[in-house]
Image (cartoon, grey):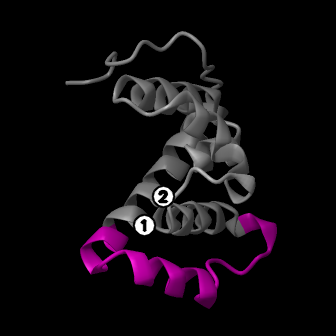
């Protein structure tokens, strides 16, 4: 969800929010994703994933990609398989964000479970 917020993808934020809520995520945590650094509701592992997602999403901001510090923090919380999955998810959602933004897909009308096969 954080990558979709950064990229301004309304449709993806809509989907992520509604699916997470349907899966039992709390409204408080969903609302605080955008300000996760100032929130107390995320675990250290979740914070590591959020930071990795932010740095992996903000490549064009001139930050030079994911810093060694952020990567090392992620490694402390996730094994190789989990890191591979996390990196793949970050890359995939960034691609979907761009497709949806370019084709002007808007958020607001998604129903939880709508795209579940």
On-image quarter of the N terminus: top right
Q: Secondary structure at mark 1?
A: helix
- Please give the name of the residue rendered at 68% of the width and 52% of the height, measured from the top-left corner: 39
Question: What range is drawn magenta here?
Answer: 60-84
Q: Identify whether 80 is placed above or below 35.
A: below
- Please give the name of the residue rendered at 64% of the width and 54% of the height, measured from the top-left corner: 40
Residue sitting at the far left: 117
Q: Residues within 10 Å of mark 1 (few under 14, many from 20)?
A: some
Which sits in the foreground, 36 or 8? 36
Residue picked out by circle 1: 87
Q: Is residue 22 magenta?
A: no
Residue 41 position, x and y percent, is 58, 50
- Please give the name of the residue rendered at 60% of the width and 48% of the height, measured from the top-left corner: 2
Residue 104 position, x and y percent, is 65, 24
Which sits in the foreground, 32 or 89? 32
Residue 113 position, x and y percent, is 31, 19
On-image quarter of the C terminus: top left
The answer to whether marks 2 and 1 mark residues whose Cβ atoms lie closer than 8 Å is yes
Residue 86 position, x and y percent, is 39, 63
Q: Is residue 62 magenta?
A: yes
Q: Residues within 10 Å of mark 2 (few under 14, many from 20)?
A: many
For the residues labelled 2 and 1, the Cα–Cα distance comes to 5 Å
Residue picked out by circle 2: 90
């Amino acid at each position: 969800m954080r990558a979709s917020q950064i990229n301004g993808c309304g449709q993806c934020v809509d989907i992520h929010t509604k699916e997470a809520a349907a899966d039992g995520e709390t409204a408080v945590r969903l609302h605080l994703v955008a300000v996760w650094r100032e929130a107390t509701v995320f675990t250290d592992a979740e914070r590591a994933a959020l930071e990795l997602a932010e740095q992996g999403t903000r490549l064009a901001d001139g930050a030079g990609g994911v810093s060694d510090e952020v990567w090392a923090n992620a490694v402390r919380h996730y094994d190789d398989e989990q890191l591979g999955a996390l990196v793949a998810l970050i890359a995939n959602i960034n691609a979907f964000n761009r497709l949806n933004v370019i084709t002007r897909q808007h958020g607001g009308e998604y129903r939880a479970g709508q795209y579940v096969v």
